[in-house]
Image (cartoon, rainbow, N blue to C red):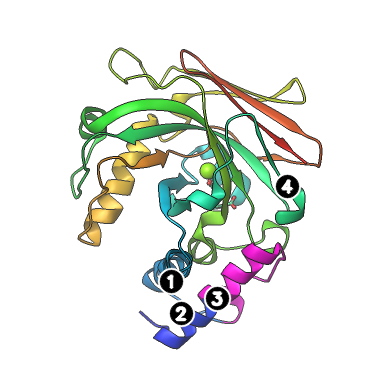
Amino acid sequence: MNLDKATIERLAEHLEACQLEARDTLKITDEHPQMDWDDAYAIQAAILARKLARGERVSGLKCGLTSHAKMKQMGVDMPVFGFLVDGFNVADGGEARMSELIHPKVEPEICFLLKRALRGPGCHIGAVLAATDCVMPGIEVIDSRYRDFKFDLKSVIADNTSASRYVVGGRAMRPDGLDLRTLGVVLEKNGEIVALGAGAAVLGHPAAAVAMLANHFGARDQEIPAGTMIMSGGLSEAVSVAAGDHFNLRVQHLGSASIRFV
Ligand code: 0L1
Ligand code: MG
C-alpha cells in the first residue's frame, strides 16, 4: 500500500460525503497518482466502516464492469467489486429520488442469493451454482461520484464501484434447470426497449462473475457468507436516467423488476 491510514480515511470521508450530498468530484488519483489496488479497496472498506458505524447494514455485494459492452463503454478491461447497504435498496416498483443522486444510470442484472458460503481461490461456475439458492432480476442504479463519469479503475473501486441504489424483484427461481447463459433480458425505459441481452453477456456466464468475487475475497482470506445477495453485473451498457423515467426489466423465466425516478 502507498497511502497512509489518515489519507485513506480522508478520501473515504470525501467520497462518502459526495455520495450523501449528491455532488461530484474529480477522480482521486489526480491528487494521489501513487494509489495502488489495495489502497483503492481500503478506501472502499473505510466507506463501508463509516456506514456500519451509523447503523447501516450490508445487504449485498456487487460485481461491476463484467460485460464487454460495459468495459468498452467505460474504456477499462477488468471487473471490480463493491458492497450494497440497506439504505441503497429500493422496493420493486418503488421510486428513487433524483435530488439524492448526481447523474444516475441503470443497469440490467441477474442477482444470486447464496444458501452456502463461497470461498476462493479456485471458485468456479459449478461451485457458485451449487451454493446458489435462487436467482432473480435486479436493476442496479450506478451514480459515479466522479464528474462526467471520468475515472480510472482505482478511483472507481475507492468510490465503491459507483453503487447507489438497487432493486431486486421478479420471481426467485432455483438455478437448477435454468441455463443462465441463454436467459433473455429486456430493459424498457418508459415502455420502449433500450437494452437487450442474454446472461452470457456477463463474462460468458453470470456465475463466472460471482466466482471471481469469491476468488477476490479468497485472496483477502475472506469468504462470501451464506445468505449473501450478489448482483453479477450489467448485461448491457448503462442507460442514462432523467427525472420521471420508469424502467422495467424483464428476465426470461424470472419475471420483472421496475423502478421510477422522481
Ligand atoms: O456496476 C458497474 O458495472 C459499475 C462499475 C463502476 C463504473 C461505472 O460507474 O460505470
Ligand atoms: Mg452494475
Q: Which callout, 4 or 2, points at the residue further toward the start of the chain?
A: 2
Image quadrant holding the C terminus, namely: top right
Residue 70 appears at what percent x and percent y?
Answer: 56, 42
Q: Nearer the viewer, mark 4 or mark 1?
A: 4
Q: Are marks 2 and 3 in contact (CB under 8 Å)?
A: no
Magenta stretch holds residue 238? no
Q: Which residue is mark 3?
A: 13
> How much space separates mark 1 and mark 3, taking CA atoms?
8 Å
Label 1 beta carbon within 8 A of ligand 1: no
Residue 112 appears at what percent x and percent y?
Answer: 37, 33
Three-letter amino acid code at the position of disc 4: Arg
> How much space separates mark 4 and mark 1, taking CA atoms?
26 Å
User: Does residue 25 appear left or right of residue 200 in this picture?
Assistant: right
Image quadrant holding the N terminus, namely: bottom left
Residue 235 appears at what percent x and percent y?
Answer: 53, 32
Crowding around mark 2 (Cα neighbors within 10 Å: few <14, some 14 to 19, many 20+) is: many
Give the structural element (helix, strand or loop) at label 2.
helix
Q: Main secondary structure of the magenta part?
A: helix
Residue drawn at x 67%, y 57% is: 149
Q: Which callout, 3 or 4, points at the residue further toward the start of the chain?
A: 3
User: Does residue 116 appear left or right of residue 5 in this picture?
Assistant: left
Depth check: give the residue in front, 153 or 245. Answer: 245
Badge number at residue 97: 4
Q: Which callout, 1 or 2, points at the residue further toward the start of the chain?
A: 2
Q: Are marks 1 and 2 in contact (CB under 8 Å)?
A: yes
Q: Which residue is mark 1?
A: 46
Q: Nearer the viewer, mark 3 or mark 4?
A: 4
